[in-house]
Amino acid sequence: MVTGARPLPVADAPRAGRLHQFWDVEGPLSLECDVAVCGSGAGGATLAAELAEAGARVLIFEEGGFWDTRSFGPRLFEAATRLYRAAGTEQAHGPPDVLFLQGRCVGGSTVINGGMSWRTPERVLERWGREHGIPAVDPESMAPIFERLEALVHVGPQAPDTIGRDQSLFRLGAERRGLRVVANRRNQRQCVGSNNCVFGCPTGGKQSMLVSMLPRALGFGAELYADCRVQRLLVHERGGRPRIEGLIARLVDPRTDRPGPPVRVRARHVVLSCGATQTPVLLLRNRVACGSGQVGRHLTLHPNAKAIAIFEDAVHPWRGVHQAYQVHERLEEGILLAAPFLQPQILALTLPRLGARLWEVLGQIERVVSGGVLVEDSTSGRVLPGPFGSARMRYRMTRHDLDRCLRGLALLCEIYFAAGAQRIVLPIHGLEEITSPDEIRRLFAHPLDPRDIEIATVHAMGSCRMGIDPHRAVVDAFGESHEVRGLWIADASVLPTPVGVNPMLTIMALATRTAFFLRQRLGLG
């Protein structure tokens, strides 16, 4: 049951003194709290809200800046520099190289994602219990947590009048091919279908952490420091198991990236929620909790390939919600199909090798329907520290996963031709376009060189995975470090395996589970 006082809107937080930005801090700070949370995305914001509601003194530190809903618009350069890490240019190096898009702002990647809110598949939860020994993570135990979160962030299907023609064509083609279509579940409240999700929702309809969990946390007394980069973890190592004591951060000028005043925090507990790339980098740079050799390993990405269908008549794909339907028919095979609208700028960013053909596609954008195939990884990669605080990702797709990408692309082609597409542009060198269903077989005519396909992702997971074996996992079954008492992780990095669906709700659910356990440790019930 959802209870508690009415949360404070983030936009009102500065007036209440609970949101602090670079310009608000004139000199060094020395702070104390029960729990310091590093990161304000799906994991950090959810955990912070639960603990603040229980009465804990919570401080949240976010490296990115605070941007109000009213500031969001359709301009890529503005959104990329404000909201995306490395302006959307990060890559996991393969082959193939995988473009990776993630958020770096108050609210994290939930500000720039499509809002898909799927529960962890039951087979995945059962695998976590069976292979990693995690208790109370079975579907029955997790159901109340999912129900709570779905109520808090208003998870549900789209209103029919917000669904555009591009989504209707995807559904029509799938049904004509005999594929079962499911209505997407999104964290949205009165979504008007503006289709600006990846640049920040301009209406606040998408219930990102910016307008849901963070206002809730601030309303219950938490404080948030934006433009604040965590640099050091303070650990007491004298006798017995080391224990966390706090952290050192620094305010950073968002205009120049120059360092500002230092922030020293004394905390009973520290929670890392920096994401699957930055959390392991922070641990590795500090040489904290790295004894198992597992920090940064087991990185999974949900590789994603695209198909661009061109129809004879105007579709106007920008009218309506970002994504309304998915095909889950092949989830057991690790293949998920969807039709997210990609703005011209995002198409250009994710399909650069199409060259002149890309400009032709963009010139016909009113007749375009984009589709994507998401693959559940059968392999994993690694995260290592890079220069200037960045992360270096290594990830090599297996032949099995490449073959599943091709099977998914073939299904998308079948769907779009069944819906009436004239031709389909593909992200494969040497097979950039097919014009009839008979040509789909060309996808399988020759073994695919991994360097010849364009792959992207928005789902990084698993680099500090959860499990009961301290030799195979970084944190225990409830998110606490096996090596450092009081150090916790609540983000995508703890996922023991890929989940095969959009992982946001899974991250939130595991963070909630960690928060419940940490509340008991704090004596808050």
Image (cartoon, rainbow, N blue to C red):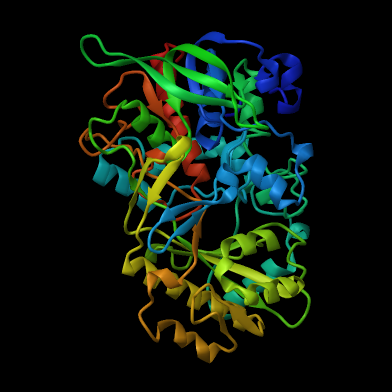
Q: Nearer the viewer, residue 95 or 490?
A: 95
Q: Residue at x 51, y 40 (%)?
A: 146
Looking at the image, is 86 positioned above or below residue 171?
above
Picture quarter with the N terminus: top right
Q: Residue at x 31, y 18 (%)?
A: 485
Q: Whole-percent x and y of residue 5? A: 67, 19
Looking at the image, is 501 positioned above or below residue 359?
above
Q: Could you say which quadrant of the image residue 204 lies in?
A: top right
Q: Whole-percent x and y of residue 443? A: 45, 82
Residue 276 visible to the viewer? no
Looking at the image, is 251 positioned above or below residue 108?
above
Q: Whole-percent x and y of residue 329? A: 47, 68
Q: Nearer the viewer, residue 369 or 263?
A: 263
Q: Whole-percent x and y of residue 492? A: 44, 41
Picture quarter with the C terminus: top left
Q: Residue at x 32, y 31 (%)?
A: 475
